Image (cartoon, rainbow, N blue to C red):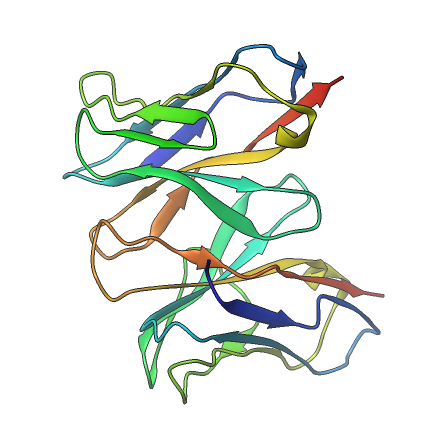
């Protein structure tokens, strides 16, 4: 079946450091790929998405490129802020619209 | 910005009580979902609906039940709460499209059963 694997956390960075959170997937067909973010005590918010191979999703300085050849959708940001501290989820959508989530990666950014 | 609401945000209740977690959305979305989020943060789909009078069980078995009598409303009920039901419950909705659908999430209900 379809699945998503994320790098384990927590990831701890200093402010202004470069961020990469790895995400790889296994899927049949042509899923869309998503990154969601969850701040403490809140629900999930869509951060960015990509619907086909080589698409790049971007939002709030975060980027991820849909790489079909490596089945990856790594999240990157050039300079993280303390306010980016949260849990990040990679997900793929099946043809039904159901989402398959990775296990989540906690990011802690220290001033 | 998504308009999806969950009440209550926090609930502490004793074993054996019946509870209903409310979820409403004002976007006219046909698809709605309930997820259970464990302390390790993993998300598990427990129920979903593709429209009025349609409900399906998700990937994780749950003792809860759901109903979908109105498009905007998707409540989750536990007939007899137990400590094992302690968790965060997240509701989401999306358009009745397909693989490019985006799901929009509510703020969640944190349930504690004593």
Q: Which residue is found at the position 70% from the left and 79% from the top?
A: B80
* Position of residue A87 in the picture relative to residue A102 (left or right): right
Q: Is residue A41 above or below residue B23?
A: above
- For the N terminus of chain A, give its image quadrant: top left
* Position of residue A100 in the picture relative to residue A26 (left or right): right
Q: Which residue is found at the position 62% from the left and 12% from the top?
A: A16
Q: Is residue B63 above or below residue A3?
A: below
The percent position of residue A37, horizontal first and vertical second, equals 53, 40
The percent position of residue B76, horizontal first and vertical second, equals 55, 76
Residue A103 in sight: no
Q: Nearer the viewer, residue B26 or B14?
A: B26
The percent position of residue B5, horizontal first and vertical second, equals 57, 70
Residue A57 in sight: yes
* Position of residue A72 in the picture relative to residue A46 (left or right): left
Which residue is outermost to the left?
A29
* Position of residue A79 in the picture relative to residue A69 (left or right): right
Q: Which residue is found at the position 69% from the left and 21% from the top?
A: A109
């Amino acid at each position: 079946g379809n699945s998503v694997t994320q790098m384990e956390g927590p990831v701890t960075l200093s402010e202004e450091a470069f961020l990469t959170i790895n995400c790889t997937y296994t899927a049949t067909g042509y899923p869309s790929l998503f990154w969601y973010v969850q701040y403490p005590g809140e629900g999930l918010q869509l951060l960015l998405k990509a619907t086909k191979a080589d698409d790049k999703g971007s939002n709030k300085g975060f980027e991820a490129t849909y790489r079909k050849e490596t089945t990856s959708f790594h999240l990157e940001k050039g300079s993280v802020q303390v306010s980016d501290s949260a849990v990040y989820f990679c997900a793929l959508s099946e043809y039904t619209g159901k989402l398959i989530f990775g296990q989540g990666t906690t990011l802690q950014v220290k001033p | 910005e998504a308009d999806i609401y969950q009440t209550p945000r926090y609930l502490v209740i004793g074993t054996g009580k019946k509870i209903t977690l409310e979820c409403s959305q004002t976007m006219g979305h046909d698809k709605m979902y309930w997820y259970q989020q464990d302390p390790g943060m993993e998300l598990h789909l427990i129920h979903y609906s593709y429209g009025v009078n349609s409900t399906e069980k998700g990937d994780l078995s749950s003792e809860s039940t759901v109903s979908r009598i109105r498009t905007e409303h998707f409540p989750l009920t536990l007939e007899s709460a137990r400590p094992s039901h302690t968790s965060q419950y997240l509701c989401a909705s999306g358009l009745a499209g397909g693989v490019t659908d985006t799901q929009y999430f509510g703020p969640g209900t944190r349930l504690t059963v004593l």
